[in-house]
Image: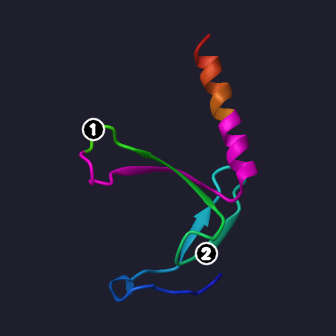
């Protein structure tokens, strides 16, 4: 844990929280997403420019975990397409 804390005065209320890899279950606790971890997000196609309406799909601790999850998504999509 870095204990870096809030970066700006308006973030003073930020608390340490757990970040869990959606693929392998590894967990780290910090104020911010762990360095090197990957986020997968999707943007609402109906949102106006500048709305920043994203939905978080998941956090992944490594590219290997993300690739494994993507392979599972592809297999599920291929099976649904039968």
Residue 65 belongs to magenta span? yes
Which corner quadrant holds the C terminus?
top right
- Residue at left offset 35%, top offset 89%: 9
- Name which of mark 1 and mark 2 comes first in the sequence: 2
Characterize the local packing of mark 1: few (<14), some (14-19) or many (20 or more) Cα atoms within 10 angstroms. Answer: few
Residue 6 in the image: above or below residue 26: below
Q: Position of residue 2 (x, y in %)?
A: 63, 84
Given residues 8 and 58, the one toward you in this image is: 8
The picture places residue 26, in percent across and down from the top left corner, at: 71, 62
Looking at the image, residue 62 sits to the left or right of residue 3; the answer is right
Residue behind mark 1: 46
Q: Residue furthest front?
A: 49
Q: Nearer the viewer, residue 25 or 40?
A: 40
Where does the magenta region start and end?
Answer: 48-71
Look at the image and say whether residue 57 sits in the magenta stretch.
yes
Residue 19 quadrant: bottom right
In the rendered image, which quarter is residue 78 located in? top right
What residue did someone put label 2 on?
Answer: 29
Specify whether 63 is left or right of 48.
Answer: right
């Amino acid at each position: 844990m870095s204990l870096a804390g809030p970066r700006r005065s308006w973030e003073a209320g930020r608390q340490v929280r757990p970040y869990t890899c959606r693929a392998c279950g590894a967990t780290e606790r910090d104020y911010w997403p762990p360095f090197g971890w990957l986020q997968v997000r999707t943007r609402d196609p109906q949102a106006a420019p500048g709305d920043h309406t994203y939905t978080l799909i998941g956090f992944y601790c490594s590219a290997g975990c993300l690739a494994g999850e993507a392979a599972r998504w592809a297999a599920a999509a291929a099976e649904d397409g039968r």
